Image (cartoon, helix red, strand yellow):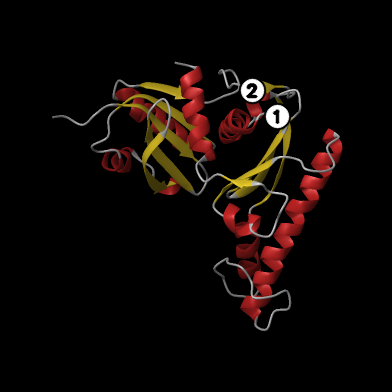
Amino acid sequence: MGTPISDYLLIDNSNSFTKFALASLKKIGPSRKLRTAEISEVTLRKLLRGWRWKTAVLSSVVPAKGAIMAAFLGAGGARVLQVGAKLRLGVGVKYPKPKTIGADRLANAAAAFAAFGAPVVVVDFGTALTFDIIAPEGSYVGGVIAPGLEAMTDYLHQRTALLPRITLLEPPGAIGKSTKHAMLAGAVYGYRGLVRQILLEIGQELGIPRNLPVVATGGYATLIAAGLPEIRTVRENLTLDGLRIIGNLNG
């Protein structure tokens, strides 16, 4: 008996890592991950060995690597659906230059709207910190981009002689009793303050100063959301689920 064929191969190609997952029309299946810098025809062939799918749904924010994957997948004969603002997303887009919206952000908007309706804000804790806003009428209207948490702490290590590279986790308190703990307090508490203030400004601009629905995703979502009651839900696979939804809408 051969390997079953999945409806989709979902690919979330971000700056640091690229996630691959098989999916049916209704749910995400097994997943694998590869450092984006390592993507090539050779590594793709090895990573995808044993998997079969009908349609590849590709979200890429790294054009050179996205092109490699699209060419590799297309050469295999499968349909390749590259996410962009011209596709059916299940959510409206009211943005001056839709082509400039990152594919991952469109996938997040599609998933958030499908799960929570509107209004809703997606906070993605990736290499960059992004906020994507779906207004009450159900359209994507814009966002916010800030430095990622890891980028901020790595910068301190790279630009100062005595500050180490740290593993990000919950600090023991606001007053650091060591260099490491002081850096953790600055990073985690400071980042929560950044996120809280941006969400406050977004809510006021939307005319929703309280109880703005917010969903978080990305590598540090759980850590930062633990101290932010403003974030109601953390969805680890929000982007992949958005790709599945977009695949269904553009079948």
| Quadrant of the drawing holding the N terminus | top left
Q: Which residue is drawn at 58% across and 22% down?
A: 89
Left or right position of 116 against 45: right
Q: Mark 2 is on which residue type? A: Val
Q: Real-space Cα distance between discs 1 and 2?
A: 9 Å
Residue 134 position in % (x across, y down): 71, 30
Q: Nearer the viewer, mark 1 or mark 2?
A: 1
What numbered label is drawn on residue 91?
Answer: 2
Left or right position of 223 against 24: right
Residue 111 position in % (x across, y down): 57, 32
What numbered label is drawn on residue 246?
Answer: none
Which residue is most to the left? 1
Disc 1 marks which residue?
118
State whether residue 64 is above or below residue 246.
Answer: below
Q: Residue at x 61, y 35 (%)?
A: 105
Q: Which residue is drawn at 66% across and 47% down?
A: 232
Nearer to the camera, 243 or 86: 243
